[in-house]
Image: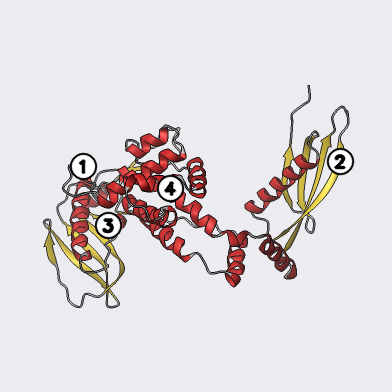
Amino acid sequence: MRTRYIVPFKRKIIIDDHWEIPMQGGKLRIIEESGYAKAIELTFEKQPLEYVPSFQKRAPYEAMTTITGHDERMAFVKRQLDNAATFLECFHDIELMTEEIEAKYEGETPEEETRLSIKSISMGRHDSALPLSFDMFTRALMAAEKYDGPRFEVAFVKSARKMLKNQEFINSFRYSFLLIESLYGNGQFKTPSLQAALKSNQEFRNIVELAIKDMIPAKNDRNSDTAKLILTKPKADDIINHLVEKRGFYFHGNIKRKDAWKPDEQDSAESLALIAIGIITKITMKAAEPMFVAELEKRHFEDAMHVGAKIVFEIKFRFREPEENFDRQHQVNITMPGTKVTPRTALAVAQHFLHEFQHNQPVSALCEAECKIQETGEKVFNLTFHAKED
């Protein structure tokens, strides 16, 4: 069987002359397109069929068919290419996307061809679409009329997020801590004095406490000291002390130490990176407070009404007062900016209605609420409550 591995370059590369070279018993060539080196292709012949992935029949309780198999060659290819790219990065900003290898399997005989259940497979990280509400976009534009954007804070959080996405957890933590130290470190750098400076800042303590409540669990880190600390339900002081201690390790750790950190052992810093980026996300949210002044909320609403981006939600509901044996009926209208009903809008209307009902009728029992678009009669939601009084 013949195997081809195609590994793309992340950016455009110009290699003015190139030719086929041997690698690991196979052949490597540059794939060129429109004058640019697009990818690297490695071809290996007489490979065992066991390297080819195969479909695994799903059990009755499984929702999807799974693909199994272990292409042992791929791991060696990836390792050598990663090391080669590291050498090149000493001189150039270059990245081989070895996490997005495309493998093609070709039978070298008609018999082999018929035995290939899967002839190609691509691997890569999925970039999910970002849900962004339009009011966040308009608020940002309006805030930018009067204020400069928080470029200092965003410079760090942007880099920390990029490193986190690339699973470079150590560098992600470093960027996060640089922002923490620059804003709240009070110029201290020795461990005890820096810990004291951070713990004495009430604003920072509040941010840490919020981040603790919203901590994201790590996927691959269960045994690091950070992961174990999180299991103890730490307080703000515990997290602050730990962050500063890890700063000493990851910023100043000597490579000659027996326990020196290694750039290819990123998983042990995953929990640390997540709690740190949670903290600096709270910091940048605070820096973005000009977006959320009441004046901009009012202006967003008025601008929408001016151009006809308006939806009136008509809600008819039944409820029962205490000690009454009959239902009362009422109707409210909720006007919101928009041109179409989205799941986010429907949920927001339902939440607003329930909040207002609870505020205005705190002891009443809500029986049913039906919401429609006033103009078209389109149904939005129907809430039915079946609880009975004793």
Question: Of residues 180 and 38, which is closer to you in this image?
Answer: 180
Name the amino acid, label 2: Gln
Q: How far is mark 1 from mark 2, CA to CA?
A: 71 Å
Q: How far is mark 1 from mark 4, CA to CA?
A: 27 Å
Q: Mark 1 falls on what kind of element?
A: loop
Q: Which residue is mark 2?
A: 329
Instruction: Please report the residue visible at 74 percent of the width from the left and 53 percent of the height from the top.
Output: 378
Closer to the chain start, of discs 1 and 4, is: 4
Instruction: Please report the residue visible at 26 percent of the width from the left and 51 percent of the height from the top.
Output: 252
- Please name the colour scheme applied to the rendered image: secondary structure
Name the amino acid, label 1: Asp
Instruction: Report if residue 165 is visible in the image.
Output: no
Categorize mark 2 by other alpha carbons within 10 Å: few (<14), some (14-19), many (20+): few
- Front position among marks 3 and 1: 1
Closer to the chain start, of discs 1 and 2, is: 1
Instruction: Please report the residue visible at 87 percent of the width from the left and 27 percent of the height from the top.
Output: 323
- 329, above or below 286, in the image: above
Q: Residue 25's image quarter?
A: bottom left
Name the amino acid, label 3: Thr
Q: Is residue 291 left or right of residue 204?
A: right
Q: Which residue is mark 3?
A: 98
Give how far across and how far down residue 32 sits, in percent. 25, 72
Q: How far is mark 4 from mark 2, CA to CA?
A: 56 Å
In the rendering, which numbered label is found on residue 198? 4
In the rendering, which numbered label is found on residue 259? 1
Instruction: Report if residue 347 is visible in the image.
Output: yes
Q: Mark 4 falls on what kind of element?
A: helix
Give the position of the C terminus as an image quadrant.
Answer: top right
